[in-house]
Amino acid sequence: MAVRALLATLVCLVVLVGAALLVSRNVDTTAADMRSGAARALIEGADCGCTADVRAKDRIANRDTADDSGSK
């Protein structure tokens, strides 16, 4: 009886790990990559005044405002 429970537990763990791997392969990280690039450009002082620079600063400011309002 204990062997069956152990085998059932191992099968469940294998299925869960497989499902997690499938989900992790299909994750779209485009938005996160854009946010990290904008933050990196702002930190490194890339102040070109171009549209991308202005949008990056706006996104970071909006994110910071949303984070602040959610924590109160």
Image: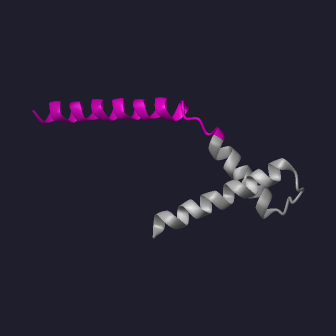
Q: Residue at x 75, y 51 (%)?
A: 55
Give the dominant element type of the magenta stretch: helix, strand or loop.
Answer: helix
Q: Which residue lies furthest to the left in this view?
A: 1
Q: Residue furthest right?
A: 48
Quadrant of the snapshot with the C terminus: bottom left
Q: Which residue is drawn at 47% across and 29% down?
A: 22
Residue stretch in magenta: 1-30
Question: Is residue 28 highlighted in magenta?
Answer: yes
Q: Quadrant of residue 11?
A: top left
The residue closer to the viewer here, 2 or 47, is 47
Residue 30, percent from left and from top: 65, 39
Residue 39 position (above or below residue 4): below
The residue closer to the viewer here, 72 or 28, is 72
Quadrant of the snapshot with the N terminus: top left
Q: Which residue is drawn at 68% across and 58% down?
A: 60
Q: Residue at x 54, y 30 (%)?
A: 26
Q: Quadrant of residue 20?
A: top left
